[in-house]
Amino acid sequence: MALLLLAQIASGDSGRVELIAHPEVGAQLLTRDTTRAIFAMRQRTWPDGQAVRVFVLANEHEDHVRFVKERLAVYPHQLQLAWDRVVFSGTGQAPTRVTSPTEMRERVATTPGSLGYLATEHLDERVQVITME
């Protein structure tokens, strides 16, 4: 993990927002479609059957906007509409909102099955980076 961080910083990629998961999550690679389905709350389990617990920052947070636009290829308001649909239809729950990147890192690091995102400058060894293809 430390080498990954050093490589990203050296390459000028320190502002990138990475997909992160609890360290015991078995999946280390997700497609964009799968990631989008998880964040839209349409897919609720990991491939091994473990429940996914999704954490997000506020819709206006710079890291949320960058992650949603650059990594999921949708707009924040589109994701919010997906959450509203599952909540109002009674078919699911919205993701858990956190107030800061620090809280995001702590919650993902300590919640089994969790998934979130962080700018590279907030990463540490307590969470794993998930590669998106």
Image (spheres, rainbow, N blue to C red):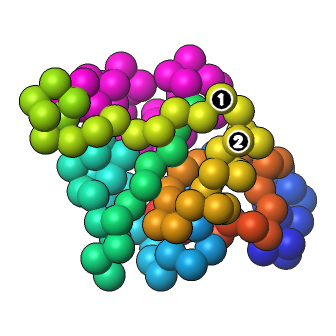
Magenta span: predominant SS is helix
Whether residue 96 is visible here, answered yes or no, is yes
Between 1 and 100, the residue placed more toward the observer is 100
Q: Amino acid at mark 2?
A: Glu
Question: Do the numbered discs 2 and 1 sit on residues whose CB atoms are within 8 Å?
Answer: yes
Q: Where residue 73 is drawn, which disc sits there?
A: none
Callout 2 secondary element: helix
Instruction: Give the labeled residue for mark 1.
Output: 99
Residue ID at (66%, 62%): 109
Distance Cα–Cα, label 2 vs label 1: 6 Å
Residue ID at (44%, 49%): 54
Instruction: Give the labeled residue for mark 2.
Output: 103
Please state the extent of the stretch shown in magenta in the rendering.
58-85
Q: Is residue 60 above or below residue 75?
A: above
Name the image quarter holding residue 48: bottom left
Residue ID at (51%, 44%): 55
Q: Is residue 35 above or below residue 131?
A: above
